[in-house]
Structures are given as structure tokens and as C-alpha cells.
């Protein structure tokens, strides 16, 4: 029913109650004393089942109640501890309008569904431990999810938990994040050109799924970007699609940044991009010079704009789903159908700058970069730098 285990010279007791696994430190080094604790705990659980003792009150620390043989020195704290589902619901309800990117909210809601499915929607967060999170990570790994994604999911839960602390819905800090057991992280592959990916797929040895994933690493060269834009201009199913695609390809703006763009963001030779990701709790902007093609596309679009405050619109604010649908529809049936959405244009913009030897500080300024991981993925593209370093030494 219960077992003891020694960790760092102290005995811990492991037991289940109500279908939930608990691990508690006994703060003792003597095995005989630990075994005595185990025997008392098992007797307490038997007495509760026989009705000799009342069960733990709602909201009480179940482990402390059972280890005290149902006789806590003070009245248990009966403040309800939220469940996984309740904490997420309260968190989302508390968010001010437009305080987070739509894509960020969308991702957080997906993470919520995974926690409700794996840990349990009605799981009391008073029982959340490092072991709980490690089991969650193990199950997600078995489902084929990578370490990077699992870390993002846990980070979402930690964000919601910290909000719960501030809102007085929780009383204890989030379990030590670094103690969660995660599989070894596989570094994401660097971005590759169209021809490099085609060559790797042509060599064979890849499953259909692996071949599909290769295109996630695609970046287009400058001439390919222009060819893609020509194709979109000719096959755009909506008049806003082509100018929005040029803006993405020639400024590196994210889809979400383009969707909330307003006409006032286009001034003379610059596009002003409204940011929400670079600085938390603050809306910032960055300025990117406009290319001649972007200027022409915007002038033509302004002449037929249907009205309203947003730059790219079909009469109402565009949703991410609609933007993705018409982007994919314009590429369907062509060689460009392998392009995985709007983010490929952003990756290509940054990669082209890197390939021309553009100062990293300028790339960061244009793209709003803050992630060292992303910089590493682009860094291999810098022209001749590594080759010249070897040649300078070995000839």
C-alpha cells in the first residue's frame, strides 16, 4: 500500500490515496523510524475506509492529513484548490482584451487541452509535484512530441500557475522546473534551400512523414522569393493577399503583425511594425525600410482598399485562419505548395540578409529577434565566413 525510499540521506514515503500518487519527505534518516511512519499511514488509511476516521476535508493537504493520522495540529485550510480546468478558465477570463497575440492564446488553449487530457481536467493542483510533471513529459514523449514542445507546454502551465499565485488562488510556488525529467533535446535543424531539401529527399531513406517535415526547414533565396511573389500576384484569390505577402517577404513581419497593421504604419519609405512578443507587458514597434516592390504593391492596394482601420482586410479584420487558407490556396497545385505558411517568408527574409553578410544587429532590428536559438539556425548561412577562417589557417 505504501513504500519508503531514501533520497539524499532522507527517507520519503510513497503512497496512493483516491487514485492519486503522493510522495512526501519524512525528514528522518533511520529506516526503522521510516517504517514506523509507513505502518501508521497504512493504519490511518484503513481507519478512513472503515469509517473510524473522517476523510481529508476538501482543500486540505491530503499528505499532511494522512501522515498526522487525521489529527492536524491546526484546522486544515479549506480554501478550494483549483483544478487544472478551473485555473486555466480563470486565467483566460482574466486577460484584458488584446493583451496577448491571438497565436499565443491559440497555443495556450491547445496546451490546456493536453494537460486536461493527460493529467486530468479535475486534477487538484494542490497535488501537483515534479513527479506529476515528469509523468506528463514521459507520456507526451511516448506520443511522439519533442522536448522543445514539451518545454513550451510546461512553460505555459507555469505562467498560468504564477498568475494563480498573484490572484491568491494558489499558495505554493510552481514545482522546480529544472527537476522535471525530460528526454534529451534534439537541436532543431538549420534552414535549408529548396534544392538542398529536394536532394535529400531524392536520395531516399526517408518516410513520407520525414520528407514532409523537411520542408519545415525551407528558406527561399532572393530570386525564389520574387518568383513566389509573382505566382501569388497571379493566383491570389483575394486582393489583399499579394500586398500582404510582399510585406511579409520584404520586411520579415510575422503574420500576426501584418493582421493588426494599420495604414498609419506605412510612412514614406518605412513600414512601422507593431510588436507584442519582443518585450513582455509592453507594446513596441520597429521600423523596416520598404522595398520598391512593396511600395508599388501598397500603392495599388490603397487604391482599391475597401475601407476600415486595418491595412489588410476584406471589409473586416482578417483572422489567422483566413490568411492561412487563401495563402495555401494560391500555392496549391504548384511547386510552391511545399511552402509551410507565412512564416517561411519571414525565415527567408532573415536568411537572405544573413547570406548577404548583413550585420546581425541590423537583422535583429528588422526582424525583432531575441532568441539565440533562432540566431544559431541562421548563422550557418553567413557567406564564406567559416570557409575563409579555414583557408586563412590551412590555405
Image (cartoon, helix red, strand yellow):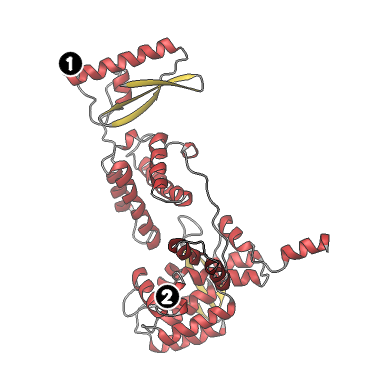
- Measure the C-alpha gap from mark 2 to mark 1: 69 Å
Q: Is residue 395 above or below residue 241?
A: above
- Residue placed most toward the observer, 307 or 319: 319
- Confirm or deny contact between disc 2 and disc 1 (CB under 8 A): no
Question: Circle 2: is it few (<14), some (14-19), or many (20+) Cα within 10 Å?
Answer: some
Q: Which of disc 1 and disc 2 is earlier in sequence?
A: 1
Kindly identify which residue carries mark 1: 52
Q: Is residue 246 left or right of residue 304?
A: right
Q: Residue at x 36, y 78 (%)?
A: 313
Above or below, 257 against 180 in this view is below
Above or below, comparing residue 326 to residue 169 in the picture: below
Q: Quadrant of residue 262?
A: bottom left
Quadrant into which the N terminus falls: top left
Percent position of residue 251, x then y: 53, 74
- Look at the image and tell me whether residue 129 can be seen: yes
Numbered badge on residue 262: 2
Q: Nearer the viewer, residue 274 or 200?
A: 200
Give the camera-side residue of 37 and 367. 37
262 over 34 or under it: above or below: below
At numbered mark 1, what does the secondary structure look like: helix, strand or loop? Answer: loop
Amino acid at each position: 500500500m505504501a513504500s519508503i525510499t531514501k533520497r539524499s540521506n532522507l527517507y520519503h514515503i510513497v503512497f496512493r490515496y483516491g487514485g492519486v500518487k503522493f510522495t512526501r519527505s519524512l525528514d528522518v534518516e533511520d529506516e526503522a523510524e521510516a517504517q514506523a511512519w509507513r505502518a501508521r499511514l497504512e493504519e490511518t488509511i484503513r481507519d478512513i475506509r472503515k469509517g473510524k476516521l473522517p476523510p481529508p476535508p476538501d482543500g486540505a493537504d491530503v499528505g499532511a492529513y494522512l501522515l498526522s493520522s487525521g489529527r492536524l495540529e491546526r484546522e486544515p485550510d479549506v480554501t478550494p484548490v483549483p483544478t487544472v480546468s478551473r485555473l486555466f478558465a480563470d486565467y483566460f477570463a482574466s486577460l484584458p482584451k488584446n493583451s496577448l497575440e491571438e497565436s499565443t492564446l491559440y497555443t495556450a488553449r491547445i496546451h490546456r487541452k493536453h494537460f486536461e487530457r493527460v493529467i486530468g481536467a479535475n486534477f487538484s493542483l494542490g497535488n501537483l509535484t515534479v513527479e506529476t510533471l515528469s509523468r506528463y513529459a514521459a507520456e507526451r514523449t511516448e506520443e511522439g512530441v519533442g522536448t522543445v514542445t514539451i518545454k513550451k507546454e510546461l512553460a505555459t502551465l507555469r505562467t498560468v500557475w504564477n498568475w494563480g499565485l498573484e490572484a491568491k488562488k494558489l499558495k505554493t510556488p510552481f514545482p522546480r522546473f529544472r527537476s522535471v525529467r525530460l528526454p534529451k533535446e534534439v537541436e532543431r535543424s538549420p534552414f535549408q534551400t529548396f534544392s538542398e531539401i529536394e536532394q535529400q529527399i531524392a536520395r531516399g531513406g526517408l518516410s513520407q512523414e520525414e520528407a514532409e517535415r523537411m520542408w519545415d526547414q525551407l528558406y527561399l533565396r532572393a530570386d525564389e522569393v520574387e518568383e513566389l511573389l509573382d505566382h501569388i500576384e497571379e493566383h491570389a484569390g483575394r486582393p489583399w493577399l499579394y500586398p500582404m505577402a510582399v510585406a511579409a517577404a520584404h520586411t520579415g513581419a510575422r503574420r500576426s503583425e501584418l493582421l493588426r497593421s494599420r495604414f498609419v504604419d506605412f510612412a514614406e519609405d518605412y513600414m512601422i511594425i507593431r510588436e507584442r512578443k519582443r518585450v513582455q507587458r509592453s507594446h513596441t514597434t520597429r521600423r523596416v525600410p520598404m522595398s520598391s516592390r512593396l511600395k508599388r504593391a501598397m500603392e495599388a492596394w490603397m487604391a482599391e482598399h475597401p475601407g476600415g482601420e486595418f491595412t489588410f482586410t476584406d471589409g473586416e479584420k482578417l483572422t489567422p485562419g483566413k490568411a492561412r487558407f487563401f495563402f495555401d490556396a494560391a500555392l496549391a497545385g504548384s511547386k510552391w505548395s511545399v511552402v509551410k505558411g507565412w512564416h517561411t517568408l519571414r525565415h527567408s527574409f532573415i536568411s537572405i540578409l544573413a547570406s548577404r553578410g548583413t550585420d546581425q544587429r541590423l537583422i535583429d532590428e528588422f526582424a525583432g529577434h531575441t532568441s539565440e536559438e533562432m540566431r544559431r539556425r541562421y548563422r550557418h548561412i553567413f557567406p564564406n565566413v567559416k570557409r575563409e577562417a579555414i583557408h586563412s589557417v590551412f590555405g
